[in-house]
Image: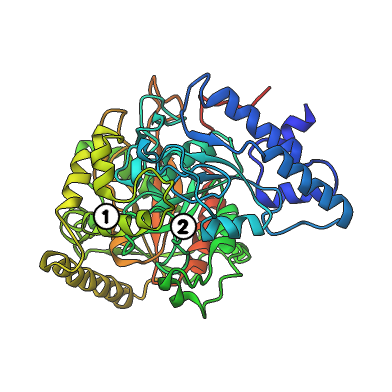
């Protein structure tokens, strides 16, 4: 009984404490997660969150245990930590499909840059998670395994496109997770599954070896149960990679001090704006608004100065008229596919479409992408608008002397299975490249299908390279709010 209690929803820090004092081994923890995967992923609630498991995970855990016995030291900052990795991130020892039948059976020759960094830090890649195919949309449906379900409400999606990672981490199938984010895709499942998700400043985390959607907007980031764990993962995966030229912007940045050491200081002196135009005003918005308003009150009670931001920003316009995701898709995906070895089943977007091996739900996006390209007048006009929005956002920070801005990540509840996500606000950081963190804000009213309610996330954004400030605000909020409710359909083992 005591061992089971030790294993439940472990943090990285607590795990390492138990590991070093001999109360827990890497093998025991890995076995625990594998048992939960067996109980809940394709059985029980059938979350359908994971595409494949690492068949060598237990052997890797044993090797780490042996090393710790020899040296008495951890092998790295994520020593023995089982990671759920989105299946558009390359792994040399497991398939990387991007959720598509068109890439089934393909195993890359080498790891993505961030996979190498995770392994170098001692992490175990436990499983590859489901995603909305090619990360194209936000409901986490793939032609490889289909629809992933939300562990808080099995009639709803887990957000997307990184919903497999989100559902798995919420259901305690791994300790920490990795998602990728082009428009909303780390923060959407974090909001929908009561998790912490970080979209770092563009250039903070390498994209090399990750199946791209739009390299103008793509990044990878942590999806975790706590701010502290998300900070630990961000510290590991951040840094310069000469294979991703955008990361040259972070070469002189300090990326090794994402601690939550400022938690005891509170938020006194912090100016936090509330972006009023990112709140809805209809009946479907009321529950979300009420939860976020309560979260803002918690920030204020912690000492923050709350400042209404009345400048108008339209998230729908940003998605439709500023974001370049569909304009980049063909060219940037082709760059990745053309570099694959001859044994890869496809080498271009055109070949994917001709193969017919993809979910019908992304056909329109694929065909639209074939009509667009980088460098066209329409594309360049969007880049001009992007620059204008970046300046507008920086001016808002300057005019109000803000440390951060908050708003609901999604103006209405995450959609039901078969529906489409509506009114997500994450596009603001995606088109500007600014960093943001989503934290659990609370839950909707309970229903028959959602006994504890549906999770609602608050997004906190900052100026470029302000990750440490955002983590501090998020960590203080997390401690004061204490809103966590466990998913009702993946209970702790007795």
Q: Is residue 372 left or right of residue 98?
A: left
Is residue 118 in view?
yes
Label 2: which secondary element: loop
Which residue position holds label 2? 209
Where is the C terminus found, in terms of image quarters? top right
Q: Position of residue 44 (x, y in %)?
A: 52, 19
* Vertical arrangement, residue 299 with respect to residue 140, above or below: below
Q: Residue at x 28, y 63 (%)?
A: 431
Q: Any mark on residue 193, and which?
A: none
Label 1: which secondary element: helix
Q: Is residue 26 left or right of residue 455?
A: right
Q: Residues within 10 Å of mark 2 (few under 14, many from 20)?
A: many
Q: Depth check: give the residue in front, 324 or 233.
A: 324
Q: Do the numbered discs 1 and 2 sit on residues whose CB atoms are within 8 Å?
A: no
Q: Position of residue 97 (x, y in %)?
A: 43, 42
Q: Any mark on residue 329, and which?
A: 1
* Vertical arrangement, residue 224 with respect to residue 243, above or below: above
- In the displayed orientation, state which residue is furthest to the bottom: 252
Q: Residues within 10 Å of mark 1 (few under 14, many from 20)?
A: many
The answer to which image quadrant residue 385 occupies is: bottom left
Q: Position of residue 386 (x, y in %)?
A: 22, 68
Is residue 420 in view?
no
Q: Answer with mark 1 or mark 2, whichever residue precedes in sequence.
A: 2
């Amino acid at each position: 009984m005591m061992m089971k209690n030790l294993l439940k929803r472990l943090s990285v820090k607590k795990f390492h404490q138990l590991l070093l004092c001999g109360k827990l081994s890497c093998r025991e923890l890995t076995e625990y997660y594998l048992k939960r995967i067996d109980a809940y992923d394709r059985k029980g609630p059938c979350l359908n969150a994971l595409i494949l498991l690492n068949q060598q995970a237990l052997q890797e855990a044993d090797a780490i245990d042996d090393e710790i016995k020899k040296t008495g030291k951890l092998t790295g900052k994520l020593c023995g930590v089982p990671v759920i990795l989105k299946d558009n991130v390359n792994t040399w020892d497991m398939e990387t499909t991007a959720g598509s039948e068109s890439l089934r059976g393909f195993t890359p020759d080498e790891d993505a840059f961030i996979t190498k960094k995770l392994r170098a830090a001692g992490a175990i890649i436990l499983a590859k998670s489901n995603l909305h195919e090619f990360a194209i949309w936000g409901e986490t449906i793939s032609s490889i395994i289909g629809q992933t379900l939300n562990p808080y409400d099995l009639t709803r999606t887990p957000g997307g496109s990184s919903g497999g990672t989100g559902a798995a981490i919420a259901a305690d199938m791994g300790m920490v997770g990795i998602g990728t984010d082009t428009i909303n895709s780390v923060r959407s499942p974090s909001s929908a599954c009561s998790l912490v998700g970080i979209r770092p400043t563009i250039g903070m985390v390498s994209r090399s070896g990750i199946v791209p959607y739009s390299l103008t907007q793509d990044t990878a980031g942590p999806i975790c149960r706590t701010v502290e764990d998300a900070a630990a993962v961000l510290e590991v995966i951040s840094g310069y990679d000469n294979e991703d030229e955008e990361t040259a912007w972070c070469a002189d940045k300090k990326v090794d001090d994402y601690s939550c050491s400022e938690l005891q200081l509170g938020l006194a002196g912090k100016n936090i704006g509330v972006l009023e135009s990112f709140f809805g005003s209809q009946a479907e918005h009321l529950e979300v608004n009420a939860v976020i308003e309560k979260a803002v009150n918690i920030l204020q009670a912690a000492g923050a100065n709350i400042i209404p931001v009345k400048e108008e920003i339209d998230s729908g316009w940003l998605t439709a008229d500023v974001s370049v995701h569909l304009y980049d898709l063909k060219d940037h995906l082709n760059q990745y596919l053309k570099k694959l070895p001859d044994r890869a089943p496809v080498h271009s977007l055109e070949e994917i479409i001709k193969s017919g091996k993809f979910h019908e739900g992304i056909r329109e996006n694929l065909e639209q992408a074939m009509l667009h390209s980088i460098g066209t007048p329409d594309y360049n006009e969007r880049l001009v608008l992007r620059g204008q929005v970046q300046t507008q956002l920086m001016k808002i920070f300057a005019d109000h002397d803000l440390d951060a801005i908050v708003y609901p990540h999604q103006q209405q509840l995450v959609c039901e299975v078969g529906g489409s996500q509506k009114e997500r606000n994450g596009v603001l950081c995606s088109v500007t490249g600014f960093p943001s963190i989503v934290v659990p804000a609370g839950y909707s009213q309970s229903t028959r299908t959602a006994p504890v309610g549906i999770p609602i996330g608050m997004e906190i954004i900052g100026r470029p390279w302000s990750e440490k400030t955002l983590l501090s605000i998020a960590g203080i909020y997390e401690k004061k709010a204490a809103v966590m409710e466990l998913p009702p359909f993946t209970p702790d083992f007795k």
